[in-house]
Amino acid sequence: MIRSLYIFRASIIALLATLAVCLSGVALADWAPKKPVDFIIMAGKGGGADKMARLMQSVIEQHGFSSKPFVPINKPGGSGAEALVHLKQKQGDDHTIMVTLNSFYTTPLRQPGLDVDISTFAPIGRMAEDTFLLWVHSESGINNVDDFVAAAKAAGNDWVMAGTGSGQEDQLLTTFLNKAYGLDIKYVPFKGGGAVAKQLAGKHCNSTVNNPSEQLGFYEAGTTKAIAAFTPERLPLFPDAPTFRELGQDYVYFMQRSVVGAPGMSAEAEAYYRNVFAQVYASDEWQAYMQKKSLRGGFLTGGALKSYWAAEKAIHEQMLKDIGEI
Amino acid sequence: MRRAELIMALVLAVFSAYLMWKSAELPIGWIPGKGPGGGAFPFWLAAGMFGCCVWIVVRWIRRSSPVSNSTERYMKADMRRIVIVVACSLAAMIGSIHIIGVYFSVPLFLLFYMRFLGAHRWSTSLSIGLLTPVVTFFFFEIALHITLPKGYTEPLFYPLYDWFM
Amino acid sequence: METLDLLSQGFGLVLQPLNIALIIGGCALGLFIGAMPGLGSVNGVAILLPMTFLVPPAGAIIFLAAIYYGAMYGGAISSIMLGIPGASTAVATTFDGRPMALKGEADRALITAAGASFIGGTISVILFTLFAPPLAEVALAFGTAEEFALMMLAFATFVGLGGDDIPKTFFSIFIGLALSAVGLDIISGEPRLIFGDLPGFFHGINFLVLAIGIYGIGEILWTIESSGGKVTISQANITVRRIMDNLRGLASSAKAIIMGSFLGYFVGILPAAGATPGSIMAYGVAKTISKDPDSFGKGNVDGVAAPEAANNAASTGSMLPMLTLGIPGSPTTAILLGGMVIWGLEPGPMLFVDHQDFVWALIASLYVANVFALLINLLFIPGFVSVLRMPFTILAPIIFVLCVIGGYAPTQSMHDVWLMLVFGVVGYLMRKLDYPMAPAVLAIVLGPLAETSMRQSLLISDGSFMIFFSRPISGPIMLVAIALFLLPLIKRLRERGGRTT
């Protein structure tokens, strides 16, 4: 009885497997995903990275860039540590890709125990670089960086900078300000960019270094304003905010928004995703989003993306060393 | 009951102590000007847990809580057998998800439970056991796009994805 | 009057056939997603977001808001029928909803939940319509100190929810709070309590894992043992007459429903709080103001009405900071926010000025969605109730399967499924020895909010606790919370004094 059941099941499986080979054989020439693609987001729901990933997913689905859906999965744990380890364990998997931000560099540096080597991940595409500005409340009476430095100096350690997370982008920028202008700003970490923006609008902190997308609502309502930009040249959206380069500080900082694949992904799959995301990058929706949220940077992929990562990783290593995090 | 109460309190006390030790990986003290360190919250909460365990043991010695006075058995032998069988079959199902995936371990578990524990007819057990994974597939994978784990049976689902997506 | 004009324009848009169809479809879908343990409005909204490209933005947000509402109604169904809170917002509903179902009053509990949800939703939408901009100011005035004070208030309202065994109640609260610390310490950015270096602990211990473990697996094991595996849950017959009677019976819970609606709404508008603390506080307050507090937890209908009114009111409330400030008040609104960005709308203070038609269509759709969610819910209640007629030996394994899949779906990690099994078995063994479980479940929800806001405040104040008392909003809230903490103590002392003299 059990034997016959076993034979029955084995023959069913064999049948299904044959069927699967037949059907997929048709499309063997051009690789395409065989099942829904896991689209890992190394941040929580509702954050900047999450919004962007869901926009990409929507564009892919709307234009039919992929025959199988991309399924977003949030793995925010441990500043992205969980997502990085997950991807590492998916060695050779052709159906797992991930949206990254700068914790892609900082988390493996801060937690060497994870044993994650980002240079092994498949370079699919850099979709954009997000920009940072220095924000204050409109009623603070601060109009430029000189005012800001004077006020922050007077307040000493009572000057509060709200930012996202600890040992990450916002804190690195705060450290830069402290060092460059001899300030003693206190950094208070929050969970997400939206919460940080609200702290400033509600006057619970004195300044922030938000991305434009996070402060745009309050900026347009006249509640907050940007007094300087951490970019090489002024942003079209904020023509009155000078860059730190103009102010005599050679300092620029970006947030990368890249898509990476699992290490050891097959070359065909990598090429497929590269093509998908190149199309997303070129789409009207993505271009409109980049313009509106003041994003910059062209589409980078392959070796160019790998060397970009290597350069950025070195910069972050130095910055983390400077603030004594590693 | 009386013995179970003591054993549980001691086990939980050990767990609390482990939690205290584990929390101490981060600073547990007061950092001047910054408030409590990263490990302070779990450390003192675990200390509180430990304190509660001590309290429970004291009440056990003084026989002042209802459970520590109870002469009832913690679990009757026949009930213990059923609960252990159910819990183990559940664990076996979860374990087999890693290997044969949800869509094969779920029907096996349902069949086992309904046919052998519930003594339902083969027809009832089979129809529910086979219907559940089909409904699950269409609700989760097709309607909601949530992929459930499939283990080594994954290739069998490629054609289904091709047909329904 | 301008408001009324705008609102009627909104209704004009919403009552178009396509949008009505979207609302009905969204409510029905949301109801089922919410009724699945493990899936809540977050999942429903997140998954269906890309599909909304097929319709214009106003239609899309109407659809998503309908799913959101439907899921809030649906959450009560799994809380009452299976005793498993499908989402953290429905935890408080299980406390009395489950005992009611076991007593054969499942239909009454479900209808009360639906009616209370409807009233809560309607009151909150009216408040929303009339007072959105001034309330946005209130939300903005809430800083970290105020958030912490609010959490203290939430803790204070459920101080009375524990069992009779004091050390075990405290143990339950402590272990819930301690487990909520697993994951990442946001202030220092360091990983914390990563047991055995398992990467699954990086994302912390999800509330759902503990709740499904204890209320799903633990509860079924308990039922199997206490009944010898041969039970059927007391059946509820359902007729149109009983439905009407039950709807009329809502009047007796009017006080609890109205209190829950206002409380839920005001807690809901505060960013970061969301519907969960609101519904828990409503339950606690309903118990405190009840004439018969001892019947709570044993099937008091007010214990279903208050949290259900509150969680629906709060879900409307949490749309307020989303629309007016661009800040999500809950995970679900965070996703909705992302959706608005995809459709090219900028949430925030200017939305009410630049996209009036969109805002008012959304508000009008909340009124309409509420009506349809109620009707659809009432339509399905007989079906849900008849599920309970299944023999327990069929129901139990199906609930186990739902638990396993529901434990997996939110994070898509098998780690959580194993953890859920451990919690279920250990929780069951502890429960047999009179350890109350509800405090642990509530603590794991509120713990992270309380710890983070407290440490952020202390960072700002250089470690001085005066920050919680010296600020105009947090000060009074803290004092009320402390008074509530002390109340049971004073009562007990007085009782003791009364007995000895």
Image: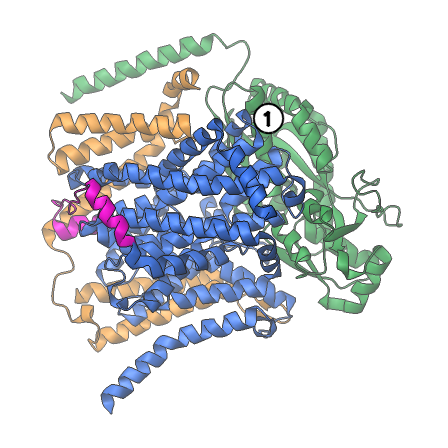
Chain colours: A green, B orange, C blue
Instruction: Count the numbered circles shown.
Output: 1
In depth, the one of B43 and C280 nearer the eye is: C280
Tell me if I can see residue C218 in this picture: no
Please give the chain letter of the residue carrying mark 1. Answer: A
Residue C223 shown left or right of residue A73 in the figure = left
In depth, the one of A187 and C155 nearer the eye is: C155
Q: What residue type is labelled 1?
A: Val
Dot 1 falls on a residue whose secondary structure is helix
The span shown in magenta is C221-250
Residue C363 shown left or right of residue A135 in the figure = left
Against B148, is A154 above or below?
below
Quadrant hosting residue C44:
top left
Q: Where is residue C6 in the image (x, y as percent from the top left)?
A: 58, 42
Residue C259 shown left or right of residue B53 in the figure = right
Against C201, is A9 above or below?
above
In depth, the one of A204 and A229 nearer the eye is: A204
The residue under label 1 is A59
Is residue C235 magenta-colored? yes
Q: For the C terminus of chain B, which image quadrant? A: top left
| Residue drawn at point x = 11 percent, y = 29 percent | B121
Quadrant hosting residue A53:
top right
Quadrant hosting residue A285:
top right
Q: For the N terminus of chain B, which image quadrant? A: bottom left
